[in-house]
Amino acid sequence: MKIKAIVTSKETPFSLQDVNLREPDIDEVLVRIIASGVCHTDAVVLRGDAPLPLPAVLGHEGAGIVERVGSAVTEVVPGDHVVIGFSYCGYCDNCRSGKNGACEDFVPLNSSGVNGHHRTPLSTMDNTPLSLFFGQSSFAAYSTTSAKNVVKVDRDVDLRLLGPLGCGFMTGSGTILNALKPEPGSSIAIFGTGAVGLAGIMAAQIAGCSKIIAIDIHSQRLELAQTLGATHVVNSMNEDAVARIVDICGKGADFSMDTTGISAVQIQAIRCLRVYGTMAAVAVSNNEISLNLATDIVDRGLTIKGVLEGDAMPQIFIPRLLQFWREGKFPIEKLIRFYKPEQVEQAFADSNSGDVIKPVLVFDHLYMPV
């Protein structure tokens, strides 16, 4: 079928054009995309720091309505509202233990350009293959994706808000609630107050952390962080973040999370910890850090955890986040600004500058929430 999609190539980062989309296979679904979030990982591809072959259709925070399903699909039916998450095999030890973000085939399934059947459902009008991204390529009017990728959600929730639950918001909140699991009364320092960091702040408040410290260089983001649960904020442009965190917590923070991927910030996220503290790294980055393993880590008994997709099983965790939203504990609408597909370049620019926390491209302008 012919659809509209935003094509990314080496020559042109964004081109809204007609492309071909294959009908769903027996284990796939066709989703009419209502909206898709703009994520840092999309930007990583644009700057050439990810292995995805180009040309491609990016987008991996899609939400929409099921149009058609393959003959073997039982999880959803046409008309269901869904969030599209990342791809995972469902069969490896990690997937079977509920750690789908640590799927042993995560990289080939999400950034090799093909799906689990080793092909892409997308091509240009002259039949040049277009790489599939995260099994969905949701910067498009429709997506053909694996039934494992979709999470059914209630129809009374505005789908335009929900796409980022499939990646950014899930990564930040899941890192806190699934990977770090702080006990009530714990202290945590969260470096970077973009979508992932702010989701982490809201989750830390849900978990009952008594000291939630937000660190950033954007004062307006730090002000927003305070409204979402941060008990303290540190502008690292103006003060020594590590010294300030140690001062706030007494002996350092119990936990920290780095969402920036910046080497100097990652070092701060480690050095702000108390003895036997734990740091979670979640950012996609090619940056390296230099540490003395003995004096920086072993002597202080620290743990550094790499966390993928919030250690979450989307079919379980996304409904949990929606329940938090209904209870007023996870107000994601405060972070989102809507854009038309034709404004995709502006959406990325606003995200990069820090003016907008979570840009969302709305592909179906006729959609009306119930």
Image (cartoon, rainbow, N blue to C red):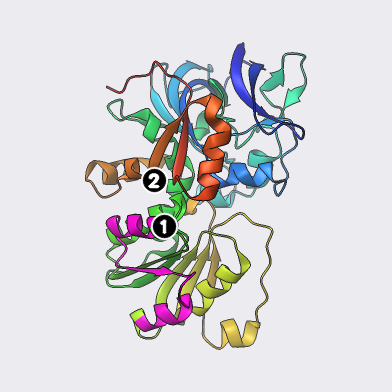
In the image shown, does 130 or 180 lie closer to the viewer?
130
Mark carried by residue 317: 2
Mark 2 surroundings within 10 Å by alpha-carbon count, few (fewer than 14), some (14 through 19), many (20 or more):
many
The foreground one among 338 and 138 is 338
For the C terminus, the image quarter is top left
Element at badge 1?
helix
Magenta segment, which residues?
A: 220-247
Where residue 177 appears, as percent x and y from the top left, is 38, 58
Tell whether 145 sits left or right of 181.
right
Image quadrant of residue 245? Answer: bottom left
Q: Are marks 2 and 1 in contact (CB under 8 Å)?
A: yes
Residue type pointed to by label 1: Asn
Quarter residue 293 falls in: bottom right
Q: Earlier in the sequence, mark 2 or mark 1?
A: 1
The residue that disc 1 covers is 178
202 to 277, vertically: above or below? above
Residue ranking furthest to the left: 327
- In what quadrant of the picture does the N terminus appear? top right
Whether residue 60 is visible, yes or no, is: no
Give yes or no for residue 38 being in the magenta stretch: no
Q: Secondary structure at mark 2?
A: helix
Q: Is residue 217 left or right of residue 42?
A: left
